[in-house]
Amino acid sequence: MSSLDPRVNRLDFKKITDGETHTNSHLITWEVFHQDKRGKQVIHVGIVHAPTPDMALILAKEQYARRGKTTNLWVTKTSDVYTFATEDEDIFETTPEKHFRDPAYYKVRDRIEKFQKQQKQTV
Amino acid sequence: MSNALKNLLYKMADDALVIGHRNSEWTGIGPMLEEDLAFSSMAQDKIGHAQALYSILNTLFGEADPDTLAFKRQEKDLKSCQFVELPIGEYDFSIVRQFLFDHAELLRYDMLTQSSFQPLAQLAKKVKGEIKYHVMHGDTFVKQLGNGSEESKARMQSALNYAWPYALGIFEKDETDAELISEGVFAGEDELKTRWLQKVTPVIEAAGLKVPATDETKIVYGGRKGFHSEYLKPMLEEMTEVTRTDIDAEW
């Protein structure tokens, strides 16, 4: 379908079905991390396509930092990220019965109250 | 003095409005998603700068409101340089224009942070960060494409050669220039041009490109006096198309 806007050339859908598509495959991806306050941890926010780290940063700025407070961004090659295999996801499943690993398991409330009472008396 | 100040505000505001509109023409058709978004966002920044400058004209000089100044003036009333009104062309030209124009903008606003005219000094401090990013964006792309393939290098050099006499037209002086200098409002177009050449030259060289030779007789002047190329009128017609359908509508 041609566009009503003469400047715009739309993707030809026939070309897609014939297997000819436009992709960003000549560009690698970069993982983007966002920091909203100096000293705070950076948080992963997404990816950008770019040929170099400079270009990745320049492009990440408008994708991920144009709204809200930002103090810095990090980018790193997606291929530099080392991860577990998807099929190993089961290693993260932990049995729920291990109460001894749960702080709530340790009943210290009465001991705290006793301590507070003691403090009050000494004042 | 107030005429000299108004003249400065108008040319800065009109430059920002026209380049902002031109660059927004890439929205939706940019070379890649990330860049489409970045370039559009920067175009919006420019419109914001224009609005801030028109607001100063409105509140301190009794000129019309910003919307009227942006949408209801004639081509001959615009003080923008001819460089900003040129069509977006291919992406090489748009990037080269951003690179050359925004270096001048950053230096101009940087000089204006010292201005004796406080409203402009304050605005300059506020927008400097945005324009600094525009310059980083332009520098990065120019270096990337200049050092890229044979085709990208050739395209960048020819875009640069075409843009050069227009870019030098940014620094067109008029009779108000001396007054602004003596009143400490702005250090002047000649000073700006000198600083600009010092900034763009090393980037062009780092991009593996040649700084075009300057032919003084070919510099495209006129915009600051309201003389424009054949490209401005159609652009203004498109930009004001919606406004003109109902001239008194409230938005």
Image: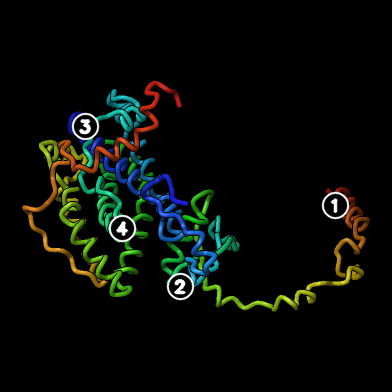
| Identity, as a three-letter code, of the amino acid under mark 2 | His
**Circle 4 sits in a helix, a strand or a loop, which is it?**
loop
> Which circle's residue, 1 or 2, is located before the other in the chain?
2
Which residue is identified by label 1?
Answer: A119
Q: Identify the disc placed on residue B23.
A: none
> Dots 2 and 4: beta carbons under 8 Å?
no
Mark 3: which secondary structure?
A: helix
Per the model, the C-alpha gap separating discs 1 and 3 is 79 Å
Where's residue B95, x and y in %? 31, 58
Q: Are marks 2 and 3 in contact (CB under 8 Å)?
A: no
Nearer mark to the viewer, of 1 and 3:
3
Q: How many marks?
A: 4
In the image, what residue occupies the spot 21% across and 64% down?
A: B158
Q: Is residue A96 left or right of residue B220?
A: right
Distance in Å between CA atoms under marks 1 and 4: 77 Å
Q: Quadrant of residue A96?
A: bottom right
- Which of these two is toward me, B12 or A3? A3
Q: Amino acid at mark 4?
A: Glu
Q: Chain of mark 3?
A: B
| Residue situated in front as seen by the camera: B57 or B187 | B57
Q: Are marks 1 and 3 in contact (CB under 8 Å)?
A: no
**Residue type, label 3:** Asp
Residue at screen point 92% across, 61% down = A107
Residue A41 is situated, as x and y percent measured from the top left of the image, at 60, 63
Query: Which label is found at residue A26?
Result: 2
Q: Which residue is mark 4?
A: B90
Same subunit, labels 1 and 2: the answer reads yes
